[in-house]
Every structure is written in structure tokens, then in C-alpha cells.
Amino acid sequence: MENSSAHLSLGTKPVGKLLIQYAVPAVIGMIAMSVYNITDSIFIGHGVGPLALSALAISFPIMNLSAAFGTLVGVGGSALLSIRLGQKDYDSANYILGNVVTLNLIIGAGLSVPVLIWIDPILLFFGASRAVLPYARDFMFIIVAGNVIIHSYMGLNALIRSAGHPRKAMYAAIATVAINIVLNPLFIFGFGWGIRGSAFATIISQFLVLLWEIYFFADKTNFLHFKKGMYKLKNSIVRGIVSIGLAPFLLNAASCAVIILLNRQFSHYGGDLAVGAYGIVNRVAFLFIMIVFGINQGMQPIAGYNYGAGLYPRVKEVLKKALVSGVIVMTSGFLIVELFPHAVAGIFSTEKELIGITVPGLRCVFIFYSLAAVQVVTSAFFQSIGKAYLSIVLSVTRQVIFLIPLILILPKFFNIAGVWLSMPAADFMAFLLCAALLKTEYKKLGEVKK
């Protein structure tokens, strides 16, 4: 069978080479997705206007909620697949593929219907003003209607990577972005569809790549492929997917609540342009976070396989290398933003007032960005080895226990600056908790016999 033993090298090949092999394609894929998000904002900012950028920021919580359910299945399924492959349980591996397909169809459709019915009240609650609402509605209606496509694309791509095909997963991500970048200006400027054109470009690009993913898993020469009977939900597999995927789900769900609160606070203390400024900062921040997510995706199958196989020194080694790589990436982001904030903000808009609000926001949010990398990598590591409860503790504590109270309290003393300050303050507090949990877990891995 083609590449039927590709996953076996996860337990034998040098860890450093494996991390490069798996992380580089994932990082390239994540960079490609970030480039899409940034170019999407650039096209909308220059082609539609600053209020449309505010609409993107208002729409972000719904997209985060959709991503939360997507990662619940995609991350949970891919991590469980890696563990089962490490245990040589190939029968369960195929059932994981089928159950991921079924769950994505059910959850994607189930989420779309209520959001489409109550889209205006939802967007108003998220902080949309009457001026911003039409832009947000036009964008989100199309995105939400294509939820099943987005979820299915994300889930199958995660499984392709965990099945030992990181390059194919990378090519799929790059293809999505390339198609999107071509369609975006065509739909926005050429066809005059405005912000709706950007939404159509997103759905169409992911649909075309989804067709290729379906073709990939339909190939019976792959050890992991579609079979009859694999789509019926199995309690043990669903529980495994949900238990592992619950941590990133809660992280994204909590992020959704946080972004809603941030949008409302920015709107209250700074108006529509402040919401747009936060949207720009969020896009820039996500560029570097997505690179670390790519490192995490490279780490996940290595850590999961070796943990399942009982090769704990290799688990510790890949964790250490992923942590160092993540800190380097986030430190680079900190330096770029602190040294060239006006140039970064100017990429998205020429509106001077908008840039004037964005620059101090960029500098503030990135203060403790290097420390944030530790929390992001550690949370993904706990997911990878099936210890979802520790990942949940990190995710919920940072977003709910630390950040939400800070968002509510600091603006009372520092006005809009307090809204910006709440984010780095939460990063620092989360790092302290993360360091304590990581030290304990690392010691446990050292005490376990081979």
C-alpha cells in the first residue's frame, strides 16, 4: 500500500528531523492561511473601506465559534489517530476517519441553521453598530451558509497530516489560499461584490480543495481510506475525539466570548474605528500564532505516536524543540511590531485616524508575546498525549479567569488603553500557571520507565 508505513518512522527517525519534516509543511500551510487572512483584510480595507474592516472584527466571534467546533473534531480526531497508529490499532484508525466525516456534517449543519435565522440580533449583540451591521451581515451570511464545507475541509486535512502525509496537507492549505487570493480581487473589484465577494472566495476555495481531499481518501491504495460502515458513530471513538478536542474547543469558544467583549469595549471607549483597529491587531497577531500552530501540528503526531508507543524520552525531546521554536517565532513578531508599527498598520488602510488607533494597540498587545508561545505550545502538547484536562485548565484559565475580568476592570481606570493592556496582562499571568503545570508534567515523563 502506498505510504502505508509512513507513520512508522514517527517512532524511529531522529526527533529533530521528524519535527522539521512535519512542522515545516504545517507552518507553510499556516503561513498561507495567515496570508489569506491578511490579504483578505487588505482587499476589504482598500476596496470596501474602514467600516468593512470593523465588520470583519465583529464577524470574528462567529468565525471563532465555527472554528471551535471544527477543532473539536479536527484536532481531537487527528490526535486520537496518532495515538491509535502508535498502538498499531489500524481498525480504529479507519473508524476515526469515518466518524470525523459524520461529526463534521452534523455539527456544521447544526451550527449554521440557528445563526442564519438570528444573524442580525447576534451581530448586534457582538457589538455591531447600525453603520457596520450591513457589511457584517453580508459577509457572515455566506460564511455561515458554507459551514459544512469549512468544517469538512479542516477535519480531513488534519487527518491527512496525522496519517503521515504532512506535505499533502501543506499543499492543500496552500492551494486553498492561492485560489482565495485569486478570487478575492476578482470578486471584490472585478465583479463589484464588495465584502460578499470575499466571503464567496473563502467558501469556493475551500470547497475545491475539499473535493481533492475526498478523492485522496477514496483511494484504496492508502491504508486510511473510505470504507462502508465506518461512518456510523462509535461511542468510544466519539468520546476519544471529544475528550481530546474539548480543550481547543473551549479555547476557541472562550476566545469567541472574549472577542465579543473586546469588540463591545472598543466600541464603547473608541467607536467603530477602534473596533477596526482591533481587527487589524488581531490579524497581525494571528500571523505569528498560526506559525506556532503549525509547529504544534508538526509536534502533535510525533508526540502522540511516541506517547502511545511508550517512547517517553522522544516525547520530552519533541516538546522541548517545539517550545524553543515557538518562542523564537513569537519573539520575532514582538520585534517587528515594536520596531515598525506604522508600517504594519499602514498595510491595511491609509485612513490616518485608524492607523493612529492601531499603532499603540499593536505595541501594547505584543509586550509579552514571547511568553504566550509557551502557553500555546504546552496546551497543544497536552492535547497530543491525550491529557486534555490539563489543556482545558490552561485554555479556560487564560481566557476566562484572567482575561475577561481584566477587560472589564482596566478600562475603568485607563480608558481604551485599559482594553489593550488587558491582553498582555493575561498572557503574563497565564505563562506563570503554564510554567508550573509544564514543570510537573515534564518531571512525570522523566520518572516513567521506557
Image: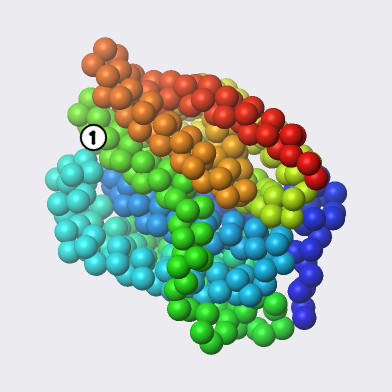
**Image point (53%, 22%), residue name:** 432
Q: Quadrant of the N terminus?
A: bottom right
The image position of residue 439, as x and y in percent, is 64, 27
Q: Quadrant of residue 282?
A: top left
- Left or right, 329 with respect to 387, comes to right
Q: Which residue is mark 1?
A: 264
Q: Which secondary structure lies at badge 1?
A: helix
Is any atom of residue 192 visible in this view? Answer: no
Q: Quadrant of residue 225?
A: bottom right
**Image point (38%, 50%), residue name:** 64
**Image point (26%, 24%), residue name:** 408
Amino acid type assigned to the residue bearing label 1 in the image? Arg
The image position of residue 133, as x and y in percent, is 19, 50
Q: Is residue 290 above or below residue 107?
A: above
Is any atom of residue 232 visible in this view? Answer: yes
- All told, the count of numbered labels is 1
- Left or right, 363 with respect to 137, comes to right
Q: Residues within 10 Å of mark 1 (few under 14, many from 20)?
A: many
Q: Nearer the viewer, residue 312 or 360?
A: 312
The image position of residue 387, as x and y in percent, is 56, 45
Q: Quadrant of the C terminus?
A: top right
Q: Quadrant of residue 271?
A: top left
**Image point (43%, 25%), residue name:** 426
The image position of residue 262, as x and y in percent, is 30, 33
